[in-house]
Each structure stands twice: as structure tokens, then as C-alpha cells.
């Protein structure tokens, strides 16, 4: 049976000898044009009652909006996949804002509606969606590219989606080595129908000839198999990724030691604190942290990377001016000296691109006059109507997002970074709010870029990252920079350590470590500050949930994190002290101590340098790993597992008991030649493989073949 493609969309595709059915109703493409008066004109293939078909090409003639034609190309790219491209010939002056293509709708019965279907979404390192909520689905032209959406390279850190169903799985991805700006979104049209879209931003061109393939492929398996399709393409694509970690010699030595990040604020206890609450806390003066570091370093038996929040002299998160630090500068220097004398790494949070005119956390901070008269107004990111894009972080700051194409923006960011480096800061989470390293989009006609979003945005950010890193090196320093959320494909070579936010996937569904599956050989991030989890999970309903989250990060190959709360205690996460309870600190300390020994011991070649491989779930019981805020249980195996291949070709399977109770783990799947390690101390200390083993609470073991 032939493929069925019409102006109404894709009805079916013949893939791997079977017909994969779709549900056409919204067309196969949509295009948004912008005219000279900055008005949008949107077209869809369903507007055209007729089209011509020539050798796999579908031609749509237009006489209304752009006086030209749209040509859709479809070809086989293998027995299991189709490749789609689109070409727009435009004979007007209207520029192309975005192209949504190919649109794919499919009937579904999602798990939370009683069915078996799920989908994979690439935001926040990878999320399995099992419900029909559109709450977090964004329209980028309306939101200006902010937030935890599907934009790539940004909050979505890879360029594909996938659908899983007994009726047949399919992969939906862009095989674009240049990582041009796109937005991958799922939208439920009703309870039983979901639409997959890729909204491409070609950069305000007149005509467009798509230079890469959009792929729809059938496959068997789970999210790991979908990730394998993307990784297999990536490895031969020629994408400008960094060298693999095992080959890099340009990173500071402390990164090899996997220091545990220890996050804390020196003012207030949460982002939502205001004025009288945003006052120095028990970790100020700055040197008050040193005895705390001594205690944790002794307990964890490792180096630490203290990462300060609310330290800026201006106001917390008051971008871009952050230096010097709040309060007693000499005491700040004394703190840095004390950290370095103890062998620790000093880090600071910053807040990315923007101009804070009025702090919400510290009402005395207001620089509206500088915004109006100091050149910042001209640098503000603009919407389609040339209106400044107001920051959407009203709980922290009032101000404007700025455009990275403006030289003033880059100069200030570079100068601020160099100040930190020269003071002795080792790590700067420089781009908080710039998720994955992407700023707000900009439509300005008066900046040094096209009048619509496009690849120029990530190119400008790459230029900024590169210049910041070179300026730091020129100052004789090795300060490392990172961003909020895992760095996207265009940013990871400049930002080698980042504040992972996989846990925000609890907002939509079930997080999975797809980012690590694809990129772990190139980059390891740290666990992240867990901010917002207090709104997603009921901590007390599943007290082992922090152990579960920490075990998840360990198995994803991330460096581990302690979020320090009141009284020197480990909290559930940043901003969670107000929750009223705390996890069992001894359990978390013991787990991180042993987990980090696995990261730095003889299995380092897997957990730092390794390539994640597909594996099935552990042979163990299941229970609630966490409880969502709406009362639903997140059911997972009590023993979690991931598999890695080292650069030398050997493989290791790690198992973690994510609970505090003893758990039985079956090991019958392994050959008798496999070696079981219950300690990271020595590669010579192994056991023969038993049929099963009892793991104590939080215990980690490893099987090497």
C-alpha cells in the first residue's frame, strides 16, 4: 500500500513493510509570514484544495499571501523511515517567520487515561508524557521563547520526539547538524488525539530551501531505542560537538575529581523572600560556611564545590551587574582563601542575559534610569511589534530581556565574568534563566540581525560564550562557566558543566536520562538545585524520594549535589525549607559518599567517560519512588540500573537500591564470566555472579562484562 499524503496531512506511511496510521486534519505544513507592517499572515496546506504531485514532491501554488509555491519532498531514507523537506518560493517582500513541518497527528489512548500510549518530549533532558495535558505546551511567537518549553537549542537539548503505542512506535526528528532554531511540541487536540509539530525558524528569509531532513521512522522498543536513532545519526553528522571527555586536556583538573556541589544562599532561604526576609542568614559572614564545609568534606571524603546564591551586592538575581559581592568583601576573600586551602572549588550563581530595573527581592535596587539612558533600552529584545520584551520573572525581578546581538550586552557580560575569574572564582553558573544557553528570542528590525528569530541567536550566543572564555583565559584564569539546565548542542563545547534540571520533568510526566544517553561521553553535569520540586512532589508521602532523585542523577552520570538548608541540614531542594520537613540527612550523606567513590574509583572510566547503553529494568520489586502533588504514585523498580561502555570497550551495569530498606535483586541474566563488584575500592575485589543478591538501603553494586 502506498503512502497517503494530502493537503490535509499524512494519513499513513509505509514503514518497515507495515502501514503506520496517522490522523490527518491540520494539514502537513503551516507557515507564518511577516509583512512590512509587521503583521503576521499564516497559511496552511488545508487552504489549498488542489496540489500537484511529481516524483515524490507535492506542489502547492499560492496567489494570496506570498504569490509563490510550497514544495514538499518525501523520500525513503531506509526501509523503516521517510525523509521530509520543504521549499518555499516567495515572490513578495513578506519574510518567513516560521514553518511548522511536517505536522503529524495520531490517535492515542494515554496511560493516565487507561491506555498504553506514551510519548517522549526532548525538553529538560527528556520526559515521558503519559497524560493528555496541554498545560505546558507553548506557542513560541507568543511566549517569546521563554521557559521550560520544547525550543532547541535551548530547554530542549536534542532534536527529536517519539511516540510509543501497541499500534506502532514512531520517531519524529530533525537531522540537522547545524542545529537551527526549532520548537518541538506535542499538543493534544482532544483526549484521544495528539499532534506532533516542529516549528522551524529560518531567520526571516524571503524564500527557503530546507537543507536537512525531518525524519519519521518506525522502531521497536522504548525511549532508549529512540535515543539510539538520534545518537547513531549524531555520531556521523559532522555536528560541531566538543571532543569526548576522555580526549580533552583543556579542562581544569578539579573536574576530574567530581567534587560534590554544595549549594546554599547567604541571604534569605528562598527566591520568594522579600526585603526583611532577604537578609543575611547563618552562612554570612561568608567564612561561616567553612566549618560546614569541613564537616561535609570529612563525612563525604571528597572535595566540594560550594556554589553560592544571593551573594550579589546589587540584589539577588539582578542581572547583569553582579560584582562585587554583598557586604564584607574582605571576609568574602577570606572565605575563598579558606575554600582553596582546603582543596575545594569556589562557585557562584549568576543570572544570564537581561537588565534588572527593579529587584523584587530587594526593593532598594532600582536602575530604571540606566535602562532608559545608558544604552540598555536599545539592546532590549523586541517582539514583532517592536515592543520591549518584559522579563517574566516577576517573583524575582522586574526588567527586560536583552538581545545577544548587541555589543553592549556582550561587553558587560565579558567584563563581569572576568571580575569573578580574577577574584579567584573557579566555577560560574553564568546563565541562570538562559535554559540550555539560549536567551529570549528577538524580532527587532533595528539590531544587527534579521527581523525574525533564527540560527543567528545561537550563533550570537556561541560568540558570547567564546569571547567570555577567551577573556577569562587572557586573564590567566581557568574559570569554568555553565547554564541552567543541561547545555544544548551548540553550547556544550563552551559550557562544560551545567546545572541539570531533569527533575522539572515531573511537572509534565516522568523524567528519563535521554540527554545522558546521547551526550554523556562529551559532558557531565551536576545534579542541580532541585528548585520547584516542592510544587511537583509530596515529599513526606514518599520519604525516600530524595534518595531516589540522587540515585537517578548518579546513574545518569551526573556529579552529585547537596542543597544546604537551614541549620546546616540537607534540604529536599532549593526553596524547600518552608516545606516544614527534611530528608534523612545521614542516608543522603552515606549514599553520596559511596556514589562519589564509584565516580572517582576504578569505574570512573564508565561514569565519567562512558557511553550509556540500552538495558532493561532491574529484576526487583516495584514501589512508589515519589508521590506527585496530585496524589499519584510514581511507580519504579526498587533497584534502579543503567549500563555504560568505557572507551576501552568494556561494559559496566550499575545497580542502586533507591530505598532505605533491603531489596532483592536478581542477577540471572548475566553470564558466569561477569564480575560482581560490591565496592569501588579495587578492580581486583570482585565476586562470582550469584543468582540473586540482597542490597541494603542505598547500596550500589556494579557488574562488569
Image: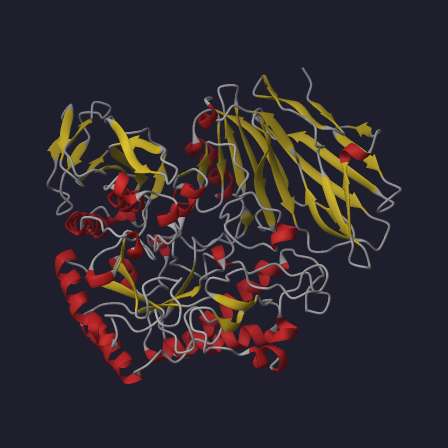
Work out whether 694 lies above or below 576: above
Evaluate whether residue 650 shows in this view. Answer: yes
Relative to 205, 136 lies left or right: left
Q: Residue at x 58, y 17 (%)?
A: 17
Work out whether 501 lies above or below 403: above
Evaluate whether residue 353 shows in this view. Answer: no
Q: Residue furthest bottom?
A: 330
> Where is residue 621 drawn, in percent x and y?
24, 26
Q: Residue furthest front?
A: 276
Q: Residue at x 43, y 45 (%)?
A: 125
> Where is residue 230 drawn, in percent x and y?
50, 38
In depth, the one of 136 and 23 nearer the eye is 136
In depth, the one of 251 and 405 nearer the eye is 405
Q: Residue furthest top?
A: 1
Relative to 661, 248 lies left or right: right
> Where is residue 255 drawn, in percent x and y?
30, 61
Image quadrant containing the N terminus: top right
Amino acid at each position: 500500500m502506498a503512502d497517503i499524503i494530502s493537503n490535509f496531512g499524512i494519513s499513513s506511511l509505509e514503514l518497515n513493510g507495515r502501514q503506520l496510521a496517522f490522523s490527518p486534519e491540520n494539514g502537513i505544513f503551516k507557515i507564518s509570514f511577516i509583512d512590512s507592517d509587521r503583521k503576521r499572515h499564516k497559511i496552511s496546506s488545508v487552504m489549498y484544495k488542489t496540489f500537484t504531485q511529481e516524483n515524490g514532491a507535492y506542489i502547492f501554488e499560492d496567489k494570496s499571501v506570498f504569490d509563490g509555491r510550497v514544495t514538499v519532498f518525501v523520500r525513503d531514507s531506509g526501509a523503516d523511515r521517510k525523509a521530509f523537506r520543504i521549499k518555499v518560493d516567495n515572490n513578495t517582500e513578506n519574510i518567513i517567520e516560521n514553518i511548522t513541518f511536517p505536522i503529524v497527528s495520531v490517535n492515542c489512548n494515554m496511560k493516565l487515561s487507561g491506555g498504553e500510549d506514551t510519548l517522549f518530549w526532548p525538553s529538560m533532558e527528556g520526559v515521558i508524557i503519559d497524560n493528555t495535558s496541554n498545560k505546558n505546551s507553548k506557542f513560541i511567537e507568543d511566549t517569546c521563547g521563554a521557559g521550560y518549553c520544547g525550543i532547541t537549542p535551548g530547554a530542549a537539548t536534542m532534536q527529536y520526539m517519539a511516540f510509543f503505542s501497541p499500534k506502532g512506535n514512531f520517531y519524529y526528528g530533525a537531522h540537522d547538524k547545524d542545529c537551527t532554531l526549532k520548537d518541538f511540541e506535542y499538543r493534544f487536540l482532544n483526549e484521544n488525539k495528539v499532534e506532533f509539530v516542529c516549528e522551524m525558524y529560518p531567520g526571516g528569509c524571503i524564500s527557503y530551501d530546507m537543507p536537512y531532513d525531518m525524519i519519521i521512522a518506525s522502531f521497536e522498543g522504548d525511549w532508549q531505542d529512540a535515543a539510539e536513532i538520534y545518537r547513531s545519526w549524531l555520531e556521523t553528522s559532522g555536528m560541531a560537538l566538543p571532543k569526548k571527555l576522555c580526549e580533552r586536556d583543556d579542562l581544569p583538573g578539579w573536574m576530574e575529581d567530581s567534587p560534590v556541589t554544595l549549594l546554599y544562599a547567604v541571604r534569605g532561604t528562598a527566591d520568594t523572600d522579600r526585603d526583611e526576609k532577604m537578609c543575611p542568614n547563618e552562612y554570612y559572614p561568608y567564612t561561616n560556611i567553612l566549618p560546614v564545609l569541613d564537616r561535609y568534606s570529612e563525612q563525604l571524603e571528597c572535595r566540594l564545590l560550594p556554589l553560592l546564591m544571593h551573594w550579589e551586592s546589587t540584589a539577588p538575581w539582578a542581572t547583569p551587574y553582579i560584582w562585587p559581592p554583598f557586604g564584607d568583601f574582605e571576609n568574602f576573600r577570606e572565605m575563598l582563601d579558606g575554600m582553596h586551602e582546603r582543596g575545594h572549588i569556589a562557585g557562584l550563581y549568576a543570572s544570564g542575559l537581561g537588565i534588572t530595573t527593579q529587584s523584587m527581592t530587594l526593593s532598594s535596587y532600582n536602575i530604571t534610569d540606566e535602562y532608559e539612558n545608558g544604552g540598555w533600552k536599545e539592546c532590549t529584545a523586541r517582539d514583532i511589534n517592536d515592543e520591549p520584551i518584559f522579563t517574566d520573572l516577576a517573583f524575582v525581578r522586574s526588567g527586560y530581556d536583552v538581545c545577544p546581538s548587541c555589543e553592549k550586552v556582550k561587553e558587560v557580560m565579558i567584563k563581569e565574568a572576568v571580575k569573578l575569574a580574577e577574584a579567584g572564582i573557579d566555577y560560574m553558573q553564568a546563565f541562570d534563566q538562559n535554559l540550555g544557553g539560549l536567551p529570549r528570542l528577538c524580532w527587532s528590525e533595528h539590531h544587527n540581525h534579521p527581523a525574525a528569530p533564527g540560527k543567528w541567536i545561537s550563533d550570537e550566543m556561541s560568540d558570547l560564550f567564546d569571547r567570555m572564555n577567551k577573556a577569562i583565559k587572557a586573564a590567566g584564569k581557568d574559570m569554568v562557566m555553565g547554564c541552567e539546565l543541561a547545555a544544548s548542542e551548540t553550547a556544550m563545547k563552551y559550557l562544560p558543566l551545567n546545572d541539570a534540571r531533569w527533575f522539572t520533568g515531573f511537572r509534565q510526566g516522568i523524567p528519563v536520562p535521554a540527554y545522558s544517553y546521547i551526550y554523556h561521553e562529551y559532558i557531565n553535569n551536576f545534579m542541580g538545585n532541585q528548585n520547584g520540586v516542592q510544587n511537583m512532589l509530596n515529599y513526606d508521602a514518599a520519604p525516600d524520594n530524595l534518595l531516589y532523585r540522587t540515585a537517578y542523577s548518579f546513574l545518569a552520570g551526573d556529579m552529585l549535589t547537596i542543597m544546604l538548608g537551614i541549620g546546616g541540614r540537607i534540604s529536599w531542594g532549593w526553596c524547600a525549607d518552608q516545606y516544614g520537613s527534611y530528608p534523612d540527612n545521614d542516608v543522603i550523606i552515606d549514599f553520596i559518599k559511596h556514589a562519589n567513590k564509584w565516580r572517582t574509583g576504578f569505574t570512573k572510566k564508565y561514569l565519567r567517560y562512558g557511553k550509556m547503553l540500552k538495558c532493561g529494568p532491574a529484576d526487583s520489586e516495584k514501589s512508589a519512588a515519589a508521590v506527585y502533588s496530585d496524589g499519584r504514585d510514581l511507580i519504579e523498580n526498587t533497584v534502579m540500573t543503567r549500563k555504560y561502555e568505557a572507551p576501552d570497550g568494556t561494559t559496566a551495569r550499575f545497580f542502586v537500591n533507591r530505598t532505605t530498606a533491603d531489596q532483592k535483586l536478581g542477577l540471572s541474566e548475566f553470564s558466569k564470566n561477569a564480575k560482581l563488584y560490591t565496592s569501588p575500592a579495587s578492580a581486583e575485589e570482585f565476586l562470582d555472579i550469584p543468582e540473586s543478591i540482597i542490597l541494603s538501603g542505598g547500596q550500589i553494586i556494579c557488574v562488569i562484562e
